[in-house]
Amino acid sequence: MNAEIIAVGTELLLGQIVNSNAQFISRELAELGVHVYYHTVVGDNPKRLEKAISIAEERANLIIFTGGLGPTKDDLTKEVIANHIGKQLVADPMAMENIVSYFKRTGRIMSENNKKQALVLEGAAVLPNEHGMAPGMFVKKAQHFYMLLPGPPHEMQPMLRKYGAPAILDQLESRERIESRVLRYFGIGESQLETEIEDLIDAQTNPTIAPLAGDNEVTIRITARDQSEEKAIQMIEKMEKQINARVGEFFYGYDQTTIMKELLTVLDKNELTIAAAESLTGGMFQSEMTGITGVSTMLIGGIVCYSNQSKIKLCQVKAETIDKYGVVSEQCAIELADNIRTILGTNIGISFTGVAGPDSLEGHPAGTVWIGISFDDRPTKTYQLNLSGSRIGNQKRTVKYGCYYLLKELENSPT
C-alpha cells in the first residue's frame, strides 16, 4: 500500500504553524509497512483541495487528510471529499453525543455550527475522537482508501494509533515491516561522507541509504523492508558496518541523540567531572550541558571569562602569556583549561578562546578558535579551528567541536 498525506490549512502555508502531523503520520505508517511517497499541503480552498486529491489518486491508494474537520466555514475537507467521491454527509449519532458531552464537561455553550462536526461520510468507518469533538473517518471508494483525521496533534495522534492504524492493517494483504536507523556523524562534511560511500549509495536497493546535512552535522538514514522485523534489522546492521568501516571515526551516535548527550553518557559512565572556561562561547557550552537532566554530578561549574581582565583575575591566566601570545592562542587555551580544572578540582577542564566575529581580533580573522582540554591523568590537548559563518554559528560549532574532541579523547583513552 502506497500513501500520500494531505495537510489542509492556510495557516500551514503562511508558516503560522509547523506541519508536524505529516512527520508523525509517516512514522506511524512506516511501522505498519505502508510506503509514504508524497506530502502535500493545501490551503482552505475547495478547488485547490479538489485538484490535490485528484493528483494524489494517481500516485497513492491510501490518502490521509489532516485538518479541516472543524465547525467553521473554512473547515471544508469532508465536504470536498464527499463531493469528489460521490458520498453524502450524514449525521453520526455517536459523534453528536460525544460533541454534546464534550461541551457539558468543559462547561461551554454549544453553538449551532458545532453540529457540523458530527457529519461523516456515508458508509465510512467512524474513528472516535477521545480528545476533542470532530471524529475521523475511513472510507473506500473503488481502488482508493481515504482517511480523514483532525488537525490538532493532541487529537490526531491518539486517534490514528488507537483507531486509524488498526483500520489500515485490516486492509493490508501482507504486512511488510519498514525499519529505519539514523547514524550521526560530526567532523566530516556531507560531500566528503557521500564520496566515501558513493558506491554503496549507487548500488542501494534494500536497504536504502539517505545522507542528510543539518545543524553542522551529517546523518545517514538506513531503511530496510522485510516481512520479518528481525531480518530488516539485520539488513540495517550489515549496511551500518559497511558504512562505518569507511567513516566510523566521525560516528558518534544514533537516531535522536546529540553529541552533548553522548559526551555526558561517557562522563557519567566513567564518573568524571568537568569544568569550563569560556571566552568566545560566552557560557554556551555550560548552558547546553545544563539543559540535560542529571548533569549536576558531572558539571561542577565554570567561568565566562570574556575580557582579558577576567581571564587573568578569575582563571589565573598569566598576564605575560596574554602579552606575548594573545588570547587567541594555544598557550592561552592551555592555561584556561588547566587552571579551571585546578580551581574547581575536576577531572577535566575545557576552554574555548578565539574570535567569534564578525570583526578580527589580534590580527586573527573571525572563526579562529582554540580549544583546550586538560586532564588530571594525561597531557593537555589543544585543537585549532578555522571556521566560517555567522557569529552565532561559529559559537555553536565551537561548542560542538569541543564536545566531539573530548568525546573522542575519552573513547580512545586507555581503560
Image (spheres, helix red, strand yellow):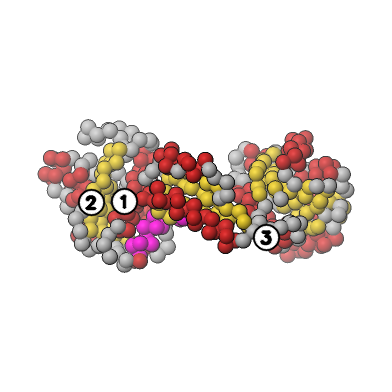
Q: Are marks 2 and 1 in contact (CB under 8 Å)?
A: yes
- Mark 1 or 3: in front is 1
Tell me the residue at 40%/53% (across/down). Answer: 252
Q: Are marks 1 and 3 in contact (CB under 8 Å)?
A: no
User: Residue 181: in sight, yes or no?
Assistant: yes
In the image, residue 372 lies at what x, y percent? 24, 50
In the image, residue 363 lies at what x, y percent? 22, 32
Residue type pointed to by label 3 = Arg
Q: Is residue 49 left or right of residue 408?
A: right
* Residue stretch in magenta: 254-268
Earlier along the polypeptide chain: callout 2 or callout 1?
2
Q: Nearer the viewer, residue 97 or 331?
A: 331
Between marks 2 and 3, how big is the CA–CA gap? 51 Å
Give the image quarter of residue 57.
top right
Between marks 1 and 3, how big is the CA–CA gap? 42 Å
**Residue at mark 3:** 161
Any magenta on residue 32?
no
Give residue 381's mark. 2
Figure quadrant of the C terminus: bottom left
Between marks 2 and 1, how big is the CA–CA gap? 9 Å
In the image, residue 354 lies at what x, y percent? 27, 41
Q: Is residue 101 left or right of residue 32?
A: right
